[in-house]
């Protein structure tokens, strides 16, 4: 029986998605189309969508990156859109878990919130592809109900976590007790998005630092 050996991704695409070369036991080394790690396929697809955006990512891009044939990709994930929603969900779960860990740190609450803002700035200034959530909001939130629903659920989860921490800070006197904690949580979320967009628009690190500290002082 002929062994199935998918093609190796091009150098340019491998560089773009983080040098994801096929290794023994990886997607490209599997003997049959369905004998592969679906979680790893989702992770690879997430990096491609993150780097290129949804519309600009072709099925050929996904096949090349994962090392899977088109038939295998569709048999497993049904469509490019479903693979994207799985990849976006994976990204949001990872990032929101990191946020929850930051908010649960054993540090002053104001410092935890500063870390949330600084993480957004650092992400944008380190030459990464930014935030897949922000990218997806800009590209798809108004036109794709399924994606909008996923984004909204994740935003609600993040906002609830921020509200809980802010309310705790108000009870301990670290933050102004007379402010609406939900409004402050929404303010922090909006500031994170604003910092990311400002960074992409060319704002200097000094400007971003100033925005961040102004936001913290407003709490």
Image (cartoon, rainbow, N blue to C red):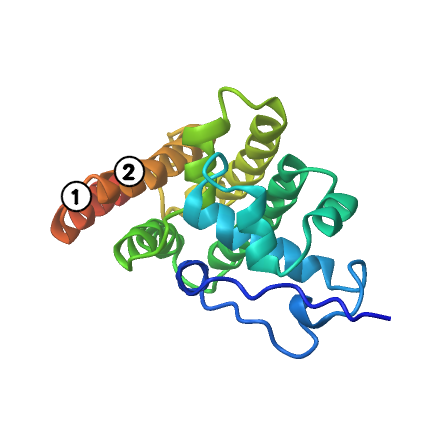
Give the x, y percent position of residue 134: 42, 38
Q: Are marks 2 and 1 in contact (CB under 8 Å)?
A: no
Q: Specify whether residue 171 is in view.
A: no
The residue depicted at 62 percent of the width and 61 percent of the height is 67
Q: Which residue is painted at 65% across and 62% down in the image?
A: 40
Q: Quadrant of the N terminus?
A: bottom right
Left or right, 23 with reference to 214: right
Packing grade of label 2 (10 A; few <14, some 14-19, many >=20) is some
Query: Does residue 152 sit above or below 59 in this rendering?
Result: above
Q: Earlier in the sequence, mark 2 or mark 1?
A: 2
Left or right: 170 in relation to 22 = left
Instruction: Please provide percent x and percent y for residue 106.
Output: 47, 65
Kindly state the secondary structure of the residue where label 2 is placed: helix
* Spot occupied by residue 99 in the image (x, y as percentages of width and height): 49, 52
Quadrant hosting residue 43: bottom right
Q: Which residue is mark 2?
A: 197
Q: How many marks?
A: 2
Nearest to the observer: residue 179 or residue 113: 113
For residue 214, side relative to residue 119 (left or right): left
In the image shown, does 7 or 121 lie closer to the viewer?
Answer: 7
- In the image, is residue 178 above or below residue 21? above
Do we see residue 127 in this rendering? yes
Element at label 1: loop
Direction front: furthest residue: 2
Would residue 139 be found to the left or right of residue 205 on screen? right
Q: Where residue 147 sits in the image (x, y, percent)?
A: 58, 30
Q: Residue at x 48, y 34 (%)?
A: 55
Report the residue marked by disc 1: 202
Numbered circle sitting on residue 138: none
Q: Residue at 28% x, 60% y: name it.
A: 126
Quarter holding the C terminus is top left
């Amino acid at each position: 029986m002929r062994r199935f050996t998918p093609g190796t991704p091009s150098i340019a695409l491998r560089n773009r998605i983080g040098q994801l070369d096929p290794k023994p036991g990886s997607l490209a080394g599997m003997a049959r189309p369905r004998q592969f790690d679906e979680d790893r396929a989702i992770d690879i697809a997430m990096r491609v969508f993150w780097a290129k955006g949804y519309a600009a990512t072709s099925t050929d891009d996904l096949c090349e990156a994962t090392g899977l044939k088109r038939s295998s990709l569709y048999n497993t994930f049904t469509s490019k859109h479903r693979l994207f929603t799985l990849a976006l969900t994976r990204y949001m779960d990872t990032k929101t878990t990191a946020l929850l860990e930051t908010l649960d740190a054993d540090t002053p609450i104001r410092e935890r919130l500063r870390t949330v803002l600084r993480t957004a700035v650092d992400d944008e200034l380190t030459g990464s592809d930014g935030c897949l959530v922000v990218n997806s909001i800009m590209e798809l939130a108004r036109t794709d109900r399924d994606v909008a629903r996923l984004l909204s659920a994740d935003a609600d989860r993040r906002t609830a976590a921020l509200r809980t921490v802010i309310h705790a800070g108000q009870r301990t006197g670290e933050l102004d007790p007379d402010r609406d904690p939900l409004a402050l949580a929404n303010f922090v979320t909006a500031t994170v998005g604003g910092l990311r967009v400002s960074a992409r628009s060319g704002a200097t690190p000094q400007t971003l630092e100033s925005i961040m500290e102004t936001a913290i002082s407003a709490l």
